[in-house]
Image (spheres, grey):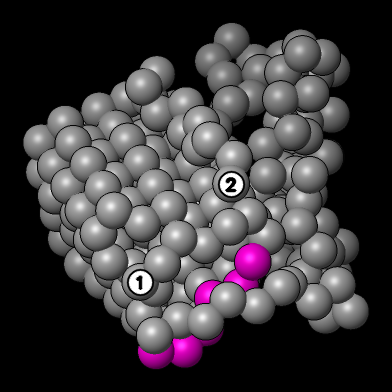
Amino acid sequence: MKTIETGASAGSRLHIHTTSSHSFYIIGTGGHARECAAIWEARCVAGIETNPELFLGFLDDDTAKHFTSVATKTVHGSLRMVIDMLTTSPTVRPVELVCGIGSVEVRARMSETVRAAQKSGASVRWRPQLIHPLASIGTDCRAGEGFIMNAGAILTTEIQMGRHVHLNIGSSVSHDCQIGHFVTIAPGARLAGTVHVGDRTDIGMQASVIQLRRLGSDVRIGAGAAVITDVPDTMVAVGVPARLLPRRADRGERPVT
């Protein structure tokens, strides 16, 4: 199994009341993107955010959705359209992005797209964090850019996470865990203490991982699985206790490299 490099030591310390004064778009228009919009609305209602108009609207590659309305906000075209606009007419203050995409592979590709755009001079960057006011964060928890944490999610203490980690509704991560880049922890999933998770790994709804286990990169943990062993790179773990299976290329389960 590869050594997990979370990159989280350079990440920012998480706090529910941390804000950004930059305008932003949410990428995507599906359920995950609309949940991100709901997190923003909850932060505004709670008084954490004082300028609701910082949320400019959505971005989506589907041209049929362009300039339609989703969750009361306009779909302003695609990410590429906005990047092109910001490259040719750079703004004084960078425009921020929230990746409202559930797929870990797509989030990784979006990150590379934005990184290339930044090198080309586009005034765009990822919003550092978007955290629901009903989430719970303990001491010294850190994450890279693009961190999203939904209602009821819990981080206890001394947790390090990489870029674009998404903690969904009611999930929990216990002490001393290290989480890689582009990881999704689905609703109700539980990680016990000192679990290491590699990049682009997706932990399914209501799954659980016992303490001191290592999940590799590009791993898929099935819904409701009970993981009691290490899981090597690119494997699937399903069942109680979880058994290991190879990912099926004919189902489109090809890991991103």
Task: Please give the name of the residue rendered at 58% of the width and 69% of the height, measured from the top-left corner.
Answer: 220
Q: Is residue 238 magenta?
A: yes
Residue 173 visible, this angle:
no
Q: Which mark is residue 102?
A: none
Q: Front-most of 225 and 43? A: 225
In the structure shown, which secondary structural element does the residue marked by tag 1 occupy? loop
Whole-number angstrom distance, CA of label 2 to CA of label 1: 16 Å
**Percent position of residue 173, x then y:** 25, 56
> Relative to residue 215, is residue 227 depicted above or below?
below
Residue 9 visible, this angle:
yes
Pointer 1: what residue?
228
140 displayed left or right of 49: left
**Percent position of residue 219, x then y:** 59, 62
**Percent position of residue 12, x then y:** 32, 25
172 displayed left or right of 184: left
Q: Is residue 184 magenta?
A: no
Q: Quadrant of residue 161?
A: top left
Stretch of the chain drawn in magenta: 235-240
What's under tag 1, amino acid-wise?
Ile
**Percent position of residue 31, x then y:** 54, 74
Task: Please give the name of the residue rendered at 65% of the width and 78% of the height, measured from the top-left corner.
Answer: 245
> Relative to residue 187, is residue 136 depicted above or below?
above
> Relative to residue 70, is residue 193 depicted above or below?
above
Residue situated furthest bottom in the rendering: 240
Q: Earlier in the sequence, mark 2 or mark 1?
A: 2
Pointer 2: what residue?
1
Q: Front-most of 52 and 123? A: 123
> Relative to residue 230, is residue 238 depicted above or below?
below
Look at the image and tell me in which quarter the C terminus lies.
Answer: top right
In the structure shown, which secondary structural element does the residue marked by tag 2 occupy? loop
Q: Front-most of 64 and 165? A: 165
